[in-house]
Amino acid sequence: MNQRKQRAQVMMEKPNFASQIDHGKFEVRSQTDPEKSYLVSTTGNGLTCECKDHEVRKADCKHIKIILEKIKKKRCYSNQPFRIMERSKLELCKFCDSGRIIKKGFKNNKSGKVQLFKCKDCKRKFTVNFGFEKKQFDENTITGALQLYYSGMSVRRIADHYEMMGIDVSFKTIYNWVAKYSKMTSVYLNGIVPRTNGLMFRADEVWIKVNGKQCYLFASMDDDSRFWLASDMADNKFHHNADSLLELTKLQAGKSPRNFVTDGLPAYMKSSKKIFGKKTNHIRHIHLKGDKNNNKMERLNGEIRDREKTFRGLKRIDTPIIEGMKVYYNFTKKHGALNGRTPAQEALIEIDGKNKWKTIIQNASLNKNSQ
């Protein structure tokens, strides 16, 4: 973890370290002078700060990191969007987040020449191939495989498809990409709180084959944005405690819903009172028609079942594939019911660039390195 990140964490441990004074404008208290504060503003190119560290070094200073975390966790106005930027636009050192970097020749690897940079502050050299370091194939080949896999193609069919394009990659390599990046991206994205109104959450369960046995995937979603909030795998439907799912749901959304729609499974009733509290109205419906049905959740179940057929079952109950499916469903799949938008866009989480997987992987890699 670099020094700017460390200082930001120390400051965030104190109460009232930052506040939002207007839409897109934040005030952060000075770490050394309690009478002084700095203005951090959101722009089309990210966050800017009036401190010297940002003005001179063009760095992601500790004040910017604090506000970035505040927006990420939705600890500001509810309509403040969170933006996942293309890393190439930021031009910051991967080690110290300084903006004082220069080009320093090229580095040859199996994919060809890669631009080298040097930071004037920490003196370290680095490439901007964030998240795809030491990979034989370029980022478009890797992210394309991820999108095809979660769209419904098997790893063998993807390998055959790439072979027709002159790209020789084994199905085992493709599966390794899926497993690695599903885990990496889900850890990063689960830390971003979607902007939900909290009026209604839904939950349901769907059976799925794991290592030859029938298990059940419990999942929850926001009714308005259709954002898949959380999931929990169980080996039994009727003896499973839904506490874990609802705790994950509340943590991801940052709140309890006013209404909670489920089917007739008794476990939801008990867990709803325990986790969400008495103010949440639990609506139990097992029919498919009417104005308070659970059809939206059944649609998500259909997506999961379609993907499970492609997978031909999962190997283990804690597989990263389910989390990767959630990333695809929320952040890269365009939904007809949302007029071609993704649930993430509906929840005010914007992702730069046409290749959403690439942008997410870049930021997930940098987030991992800074911890």
Image (tube, rainbow, N blue to C red):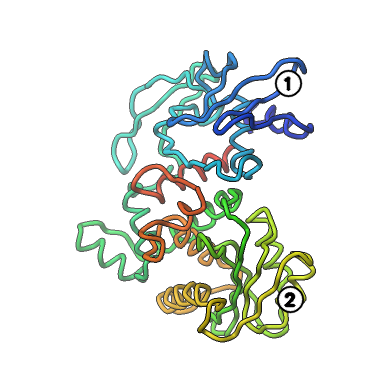
Q: Which residue is mark 1?
A: 31
Q: Residue furthest front?
A: 291
Amino acid, disc 2: Asn
Residue drawn at x 51%, y 53% as measured from the top left: 347
Amino acid, disc 1: Gln
Among the 4 quarters of the image, the one containing residue 247: bottom right
Q: Which residue is mark 2?
A: 241
Distance between mark 2 and mark 1 Cα atoms: 45 Å
Q: Quadrant of the N terminus?
A: top right
Rendered position, 150 above or below 263: above
Comparing 257 with 13, the one in front is 257
Q: Position of residue 273 (x, y in %)?
A: 78, 70
Helix, strand or loop at label 2? It is loop
Q: Position of residue 79 (x, y in %)?
A: 56, 44
Helix, strand or loop at label 1? It is loop
Sequence-earlier tag: 2 or 1: 1
Q: Position of residue 161 (x, y in %)?
A: 25, 65
Q: Position of residue 265 (x, y in %)?
A: 67, 83
Rendered position, 332 above or below 259: above
Label 2: how many residues lie within 10 Å, few (<14), some (14-19) or many (20+)?
A: some
Label 1: how many residues lie within 10 Å, few (<14), some (14-19) or many (20+)?
A: some
Q: Quadrant of the C terminus?
A: top right
Among the 4 quarters of the image, the one containing residue 165: bottom left
